[in-house]
Image (tube, rainbow, N blue to C red):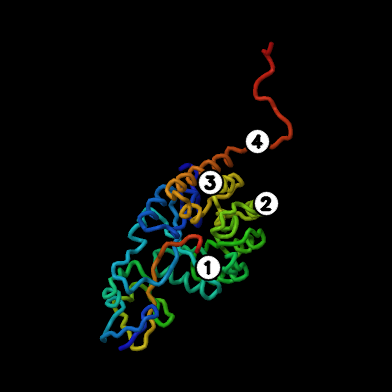
Amino acid sequence: MNQDPLIIAGRTFHSRLWVGTGKYQNFEETRKAIEASGADVVTVAVRRVNITDNKSENLLDYLDPKKYTILPNTAGCYTVEDAVRYSRLARAAGVSDLVKLEVIGDERTLFPDTAGLIEAAKILIAEGFVVLPYTNDDPIVAKKLVDIGCPAVMPLAAPIGSGLGIRNPYNLKIIMETVNVPVIVDAGVGTASDAALAMEYGADAVLMNTAIAGAKDPLMMATAMRYAVDAGRLAYRAGRIPRKLYATASSPIEGML
Amino acid sequence: MNIVVNGEQREADEPLTVAQLLETLHLRSEQVAVEINLKILDRGDFLNWNLHDGDKVEVLSFIGGGSPT
């Protein structure tokens, strides 16, 4: 798989599985699960530090920035203003211009507010950010995001944390055919077959958090997802056989008695 | 002087730089972002930036998050 790197805005990534760092029991479990996943991009959120507990640890103590690309998100932002503010804070807290831009439209579905997303992306791109937008499975919006300068798009498979899998494979395929940048399927994956399917459809990468962190055995699921993403990618590149209604014998007829 | 740090009122002796405040909070400057009265500081300014009475200070860092909760 190392002969098949993912390149976004001049940055080279070797794993096509990207993982979030939320919902784990503790930082040690986070570290182990990420290691098992083989991911080299990890997403983080930006929040107030706990100033009352001097002993509280920092996530960055567990994630070697030489080993991982830290991708801050704007999770929890419901307005353009908040998403822009958190992006700027993320850049100040970190070391890069990368941001996974989320402008959430609704608490119940956590679906993106795509109008706000485009507006926020424009502002941030003008400020030199590398904006990776968490978007809906809408090909028109994906195209607009690319047109304004997003070097990749991150359409959802299903609502965040829902585990429903890919609900609209045809739209995702249209997005993959429409845009000329990497497509990273983000959110909604429930189990390994969902991730493999996304890759078989032609996704360039898959980002997930809950599917791993919420599994009974997160480390084992992280390993399963690693294999699933690799298998799906290889199958995509290998090219599947066409579907046919009737059988085609695999064994020759010649030589039968 | 009185300042507000992450929503909490704090009394502090002047002069106090951002770097000194972070030190009293046991925070490493390379792991945080600091916003004062809605202005985000460059990390390079922490050392010489003096806080003033009434300043609203926000200190933020990266936490676990992915697909958000």
Residue type marked 1: Ile
Residue type marked 2: Tyr
Question: Mark 1 to mark 4: distance in Å?
Answer: 41 Å
Question: What numbered label is drawn on residue A241?
Answer: 4
Question: What numbered label is drawn on residue A192?
Answer: 3
* Closer to the camera in the image, A214 or B21: A214
Q: Are marks 1 and 4 on the same chain?
A: yes
- Residue A165: x and y, percent? 59, 52
Q: Chain of mark 2?
A: A
Question: What numbered label is drawn on residue A170?
Answer: 2
Please tell me how many numbered marks the rendered image carries: 4
Q: Are marks 3 and 4 on the same chain?
A: yes
Residue type marked 4: Ile
Q: Which residue is mark 1?
A: A125
- Specify few, some or many for label 2: CA neighbours under 10 Å numbering under 14, 14-19, or 20 or more: few
Q: Earlier in the sequence, mark 3 or mark 4?
A: 3
- Specify few, some or many for label 1: CA neighbours under 10 Å numbering under 14, 14-19, or 20 or more: some
Tell us which disc is closer to us: 3 or 1: 3
Question: Mark 1 to mark 2: distance in Å?
Answer: 29 Å
Q: Earlier in the sequence, mark 2 or mark 4?
A: 2
Quarter of the picture holding the C terminus of chain A: top right
Question: Under tag 2, what secondary structure?
Answer: helix
Q: Earlier in the sequence, mark 3 or mark 1?
A: 1
Q: Earlier in the sequence, mark 1 or mark 4?
A: 1
Tell us which disc is closer to us: 3 or 2: 3
Q: Earlier in the sequence, mark 1 or mark 2?
A: 1
Q: Chain of mark 4?
A: A
Q: Chain of mark 1?
A: A
